Each structure stands twice: as C-alpha cells, then as structure tokens.
Image: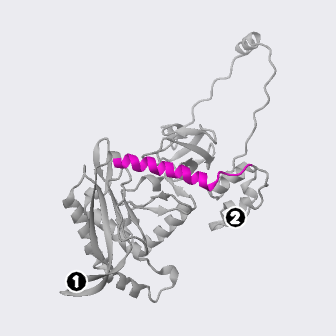
Amino acid sequence: MMGVFQMPSLGADMEDGTLVEWLVAPGDDVKRGDIVAVVETQKGAIEIEIFEAGIVQSLDAELGARLPVGAPLATILAEGEAPPPAPAAPTDEAEAERHEIAPTATAPPPPETRTITFGIAASPAARRRAAEAHIELAGLAGSGPGGAVMLRDVEGIAPAQDSPARKPSDAMAEMRKAIAAAMQRSKREIPHFQLSQSVDIQTASDWLSARNADLPPAERILLGTLFLKAAALAAAKVKEMNGHYGDDGFIPARAVNLGVAVALRGGGLIAPAIPQADGLSLPDLMAAMKDLVARARAMRLRSSEMTSGTLTVSSLGEKGADAMAGIIFPPQVALLAIGAPKLRPWVVDGEVVPRLLATFTLSADHRVSDGRQANRFLAEIDAQLQKPEAL
C-alpha cells in the first residue's frame, strides 16, 4: 500500500527541520534502514533513514524547505504495487474550450533547474558549502574516510567572493538554544531525583591494564567502555531505568540502546545511541563508541541514533570533577553521570589502602522509579565492575 514518508521527530524538542539533501530519486528502490535524505535541525545535520521497503514514487518536498514534524517528504510505493494512473489527457474539445476562455498572456519563463547529486559521500557541511558556491561534488576528490568530501575540500576551491557558510558560532548558538529548551522542559516536566554511589574501580582498572599491555593501541579498550557495558547490563536487569515515558505512561524497552553524551568541538552536546549495547562484547562496544563519537563530531549521525536511546550515560572522562548530576533526556527516564576516577583512601579487609574510585550519580524519573530501584541499579553496576573479566 502506498505510504507517505514524513519529516521525523529527531528529539522531544524538535518542531521542524530543513531539508538540505535528497539521497534518492523517483524510481529508486529503498529498504528499511536506507538513508534517503539529510535534514538540518538546531542540533546539526542528521541523515534520515526510512523504515519501509518500496519504490520512491515522488519527492514531495523542496530542498531548502523548512518543514514541521509530520510534513510529507516523499511518496513510497509498496513492493509490487503499481503506480497510480496518470491523469487523463484532455480531449480536443476541452482543450479548444480552454484556449477559447483563457486570456492571452506571455508565457512565463521556464523554471530554473537544479542538479541534485545522489550517492556522493560528503559531510553535511561540505554539501552546504558546495551548494552555496555552486560547486559540483562529483568533481571533487574527498579527503575524508572512504574518500568522502569534507568541508576543507570544498573550501580549497570555493571562490572567496561567494557568500560564506553559517559561522560555527551561529551554529553553536542555535544548538545551545535547542539544548536549553530541551533541558528546561525536562526539568519542568520530569520529577527528577538523584542517587550517588562511590565505586571501587581498582580491580577493573588493573584487569584492563593487564589486558591492554601486549595489544597495539588500535585494539586497546578504554576504562569508559567497561563503564558503558556495566551500565547496559544493569539496565537490562533493572528495567525501570530503561525505556520511554509518554502519553501512555512508562513503556520499558526491549533492548538497551545506550545513549552516549558526546561533547562537540566548539561547544554543544549530543547523545546518540548504541543499539543493543548490553549484547556487545567489549571490543565491539569500544568500536561502536569510537565510531559514534567520530560521526557525532563530523555531524554524520543517523536519525535512528538520535531517537532510539533508552538510557544515557554521560562521563567526565579521566580528568575533571569528582561527580556530577545530569538532566534526563526526554522521553528517557534515567541518566547516569560518571565522575572522573580519583585515587582515594578506601577500607579493604579492615585496612585503609589507596584505591581508584569513581562516583556514579543516577538521575531518575520519580514517576517510574524510586530509591529502591535506583539503589539496585547502582549496586548492579558496582557488582559488574568487580568482575571485569565477565563483562
């Protein structure tokens, strides 16, 4: 059955987006998960996936159009479905009658044509700059991953007199507005409560050092990967921390799609998700995290990565404050914030010894959980990190 592909919602705070590129044309076959368009929001340019298989019948939105969530973008024919019949041609009599009653007028000039390039790997920033400078991407040699055209490739040949692309400071200002709106709504609508626990991570750190000792840098695992896996496993057990809260109340998620808060260069924060993180091995989780961070900072994220998160983890890394309390990303119901690991005095077997500690602070939605579930979640993370070889 013919379907309408609509402007998706890429976050609880999104009201509209600007269509900046089509990656398909009428007549193209598409399948679930294919990237078909690029939409720019206040959080950057996002690659839009389609979630039905079929044939593109028509593109129903113009490039550059700012469209609200739910606006039609394209018409998709189901597999095997015949296209609708073309409008019947007017009869000679009707055509003659139309000419008799139509006033004489000068024919309008033909509309300006635009050439749309499909299937060329390029960053959204490069595409915007190329469009502004009237440069064909097909003629450029890309310096990015897999030969992708990057902004620097376009800037190298773009005429100086062309209108400049939007300043990074302007983009960051827009992102800050989006973050402020989302966080203000979150604090207003979600009854947050926080619970913190200091976790002895010395055993995990020692195990990781031994594991990484004889491996090349590309195969080593960061301590933060263990934190992510422990959080994902805990979320799979304490389901009140993993899901979405909407008009129908709380809906627990079937999988742990772990959102990872990524600080962008120049400012801003974004939290795309790693799907089914609880089922990934540590090397696979490390690879997924590196890939996600790289694409987030290059603004090459997919729409599903922006909307599928069921729990978010935000870490301060190896250096920074001891602890922080985060704000939940709606419609999620929890956020785990991890302070920088610090060497502290700690009691082990009745003796005070130096141990590496990290403070885990859970922000949770009181409509879904209370201190009992939050305590279970943090205790489960602690337990997982005491046996890192099993992660």
Look at the image and give the residue range highlighted in magenta: 163-187
Badge 1: few (under 14), some or many (20 or more) residues near its Cα, within 10 Å? Answer: few
**The residue tagged with tag 1: helix, strand or loop?**
strand
| Amino acid at dot 1 | Val
Residue sitting at x 58%, y 50%: 38
| Amino acid at dot 2 | Gly
Residue sitting at x 44%, y 85%: 212
First in sequence, mark 2 or 1: give its number.
2
For mark 2, what is the residue?
A: 142
* 103 vs 203: above or below: above
Give percent across and percent down for residue 28. Answer: 61, 47
Badge 2: few (under 14), some or many (20 or more) residues near its Cα, within 10 Å? Answer: many
Q: Quadrant of residue 258?
A: bottom left
Give percent across and percent down for residue 141. Answer: 73, 64
Side (left or right) of 356 relative to 370:
right
| Observer-nearest of 78 and 224 | 224
Q: CA distance from mark 2 to mark 1?
A: 56 Å
Q: Quadrant of residue 201?
A: bottom left
Residue 26 within the magenta-colored segment of the rendering: no
Q: Can residue 191 be spotted in the picture?
A: yes
The quarter of the image holding the C terminus is bottom left
For mark 1, what is the residue?
A: 347
